[in-house]
């Protein structure tokens, strides 16, 4: 991206600022890890009842959990500012983001990292690594994990952006519209084949979360043979990002600032 | 001294005309749902499609020449901020045409942003919890400010706005006055061709206000910046601007030099004299005739007080001479309505622009 250095400098400065709140950092790390572990406990209960979920073993599902947690963590680390937008709209604070000579969406996203992201990133890493290790997976699978995580964070963030932009025009400035894509992400941690077809395919084609956890899981564990798959995820991520920025700019046109 | 008219170093391809900004029939209206008061009203509004149109700016036209210094005034809700937001590309107008440095703001917001500086006095602009110094460095990267320009403006800002002790402080620890000074410095670091300052002295104490005005005037002169300031403090305008735009209910009520403004709305200059003895009622008649001959008008002649109003410049000496000859004057005062009184008077007129 042109002007990448600007966004990178913005990110570094913002991260440095966040790191000043040490207690906030520690607590955030703790709570996000706890949330991931609680979900894992639920998974453990499920696998106490049954030995596999639609052909997926516990270790394999944990791989999906790990990828999803890391994607969420990466989104929180790099693109968390989107969560502030509904609040900015109410307060009319979006204005100040629009006076800089940079693209408003990437600049907004990058300028407020969230530190509890590290909890999700670390837990996710532990889960993914644990899964790949116990299942003795080849090194190629390990190498692809960061690619999937990065693409995952882009795809998830794009979904947040799209829902947020629609709320400019149709819903009004209410924060809960962002909970829809967030809740969908929680659902996409399980093998999509356990869901009814419309959810299954919805999460592959409409809100394509399956592209960065379910499909990679299928390729890694040989459930689906698709060697070009490694390239599919980045392609989807790029398309999602482009669509998200389009929708965002469309939404901005309908932005009504406050009176002052 | 380095003088760069209109922030030339990274100027856009030279705009054919000399105007920095052109506004034609600009208007902005909002749609608001009609809502009755109370909870019941709020619930009803959920299902209602009735909308009300609010006109924030209507049919606004004006042009700014390069390097002009213009103040935009008007009551709360007159449409000042909305206008500024449309000129900077934040809001999309409902109608009309705008060209700023030859660009349509809301279509080419980013390219335009490189060449303009913006301060919104009512809200902090420096985005980060990071120290002021680093914010400046970030802006330097963001605007690709040439080192010589950056060095120059930075030095001036630090010196004239007294930023030295603030540089290492994170923005969130700054007081309002400190923050505003930093905001202002940040907005002009790249020596913009146009600066839009929305209430740059709001909530500041008198000495800081003075500092801010001096800095604005100085940096404007040095770089030939086109200046558009909105404010409620008319001193900001009398000290930094030459031209005045008066907005009223979204309409332009006056556009011209400050002098023309005073002449139009403050034609009444007065001479107030106090006499030694109470005036005899027979004096008023003949005096009024004499005063009229010298270009004045006798407004009051009662008790110890005589008030003469005149419009033409230069009539004062003759009128004073007349009063001194005819009456036993113990004290004499020249009164000129100041700009604040004029503006207040305009605001109070009930049906000025009309709806």
Image (cartoon, rainbow, N blue to C red):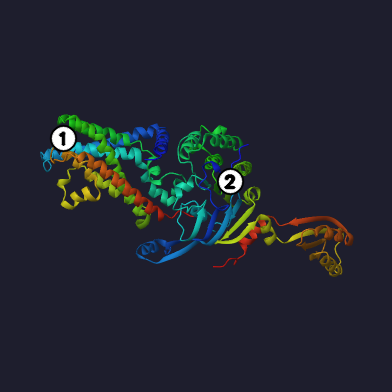
Labels 2 and 1 touching (C-beta < 8 A): no
Return the x and y of residue B248 as percentages of the image width and height.
57, 61
Quadrant position of the C terminus of chain B in the picture: bottom right
- Asked whether the viewer can see residue B176, the reply is no
Residue named by callout 1: A59
Residue at horizontal 16 percent and vertical 48 percent from the top: A195
Asked if both marks, 2 and 1, belong to the same chain, the answer given is no
Chain letter of mark 2 equals: B
Residue at horizontal 78 percent and vertical 56 percent from the top: B334
Return the x and y of residue B35 as percentages of the image width and height.
42, 64
Quadrant position of the N terminus of chain B in the picture: top right
Foreground of the two, B257 or B326: B257
Q: In this view, does A9 lie to the left or right of B151?
A: left
Q: In this view, does A225 lie to the left or right of A231?
A: left
The residue mark sitting in front, 2 or 1, is: 2
Residue named by callout 2: B225
């Amino acid at each position: 991206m042109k002007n990448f250095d600007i966004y990178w400098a913005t990110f570094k400065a913002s991260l440095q600022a966040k790191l000043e709140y040490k207690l906030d950092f520690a607590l955030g790390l703790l709570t996000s890890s706890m949330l991931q572990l609680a979900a894992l406990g639920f998974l453990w209960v499920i696998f106490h009842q049954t030995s596999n979920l639609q052909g997926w073993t516990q270790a394999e599902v944990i791989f999906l959990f790990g990828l999803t947690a890391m994607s969420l963590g990466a989104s929180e680390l790099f693109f968390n500012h989107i969560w502030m937008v509904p609040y900015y709209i109410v307060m009319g604070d979006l204005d100040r983001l629009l006076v800089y000579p940079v693209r408003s969406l990437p600049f907004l996203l990058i300028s407020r990292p969230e530190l509890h992201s590290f909890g999700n990133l670390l837990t996710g890493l532990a889960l993914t690594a644990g899964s790949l290790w116990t299942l003795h997976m080849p090194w190629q699978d390990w190498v692809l994990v960061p690619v999937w995580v990065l693409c995952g964070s882009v795809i998830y963030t794009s979904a947040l952006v799209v829902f947020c932009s629609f709320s400019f025009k149709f819903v009004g400035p209410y924060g809960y519209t962002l909970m829809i894509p967030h809740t969908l992400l929680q659902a996409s941690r399980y093998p999509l084949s356990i869901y009814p077809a419309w959810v299954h395919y919805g999460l592959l084609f409409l809100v394509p979360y399956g592209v960065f956890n379910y499909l990679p899981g299928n390729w890694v564990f040989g459930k689906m043979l698709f060697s070009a798959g490694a390239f599919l995820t980045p392609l989807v991520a790029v398309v999602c990002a482009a669509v998200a920025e389009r929708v965002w700019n469309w939404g901005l046109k309908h932005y009504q600032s406050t009176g002052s | 001294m380095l003088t760069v008219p209109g922030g030339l170093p990274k100027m856009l391809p030279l705009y054919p005309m000399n105007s920095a900004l052109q506004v034609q029939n600009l208007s902005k209206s909002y749609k608001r749902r009609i809502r009755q008061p109370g909870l019941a009203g709020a619930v009803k509004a959920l299902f209602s499609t009735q909308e009300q149109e609010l006109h924030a700016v209507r049919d606004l036209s004006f042009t700014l020449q390069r390097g002009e210094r213009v103040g935009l005034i008007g009551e709360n809700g007159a449409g000042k901020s909305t206008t500024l937001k449309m000129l900077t590309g934040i809001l999309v107008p409902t109608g009309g045409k705008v060209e700023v440095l030859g660009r349509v703001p809301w279509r080419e917001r980013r390219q335009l942003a490189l060449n303009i500086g913006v301060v919104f006095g009512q809200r902090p602009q420096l985005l980060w919890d990071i120290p002021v110094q680093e914010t400046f460095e970030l802006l330097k990267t963001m605007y690709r400010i040439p080192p010589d320009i950056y060095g120059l403006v930075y030095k001036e800002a630090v010196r004239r706005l007294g930023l030295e002790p603030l540089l290492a402080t994170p923005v969130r620890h700054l007081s309002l006055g400190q923050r505003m000074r930093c905001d202002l410095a940040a907005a002009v670091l790249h020596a913009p061709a146009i600066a839009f300052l929305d209430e740059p002295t709001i909530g500041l104490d008198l000495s800081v206000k003075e500092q801010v005005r001096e800095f604005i005037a100085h940096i404007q002169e040095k770089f030939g910046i086109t200046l558009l300031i909105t404010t409620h403090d008319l001193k900001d305008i009398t000290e930094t601007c030459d031209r005045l735009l008066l907005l009223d209910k979204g309409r332009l009520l006056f556009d011209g030099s400050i002098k023309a403004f005073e002449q139009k709305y403050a034609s009444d200059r007065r001479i107030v004299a106090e006499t030694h003895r109470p005036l005899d009622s027979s004096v008023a008649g003949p005096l009024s005739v004499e005063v009229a001959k010298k270009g004045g008008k006798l407004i009051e002649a009662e008790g110890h007080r005589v008030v003469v109003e005149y419009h033409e410049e230069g009539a004062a000496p003759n009128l004073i001479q007349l009063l001194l000859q005819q009456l036993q004057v113990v004290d004499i005062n020249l009164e000129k309505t100041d700009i604040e009184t004029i503006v207040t008077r305009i605001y109070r007129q009930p049906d000025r622009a009309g709806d």
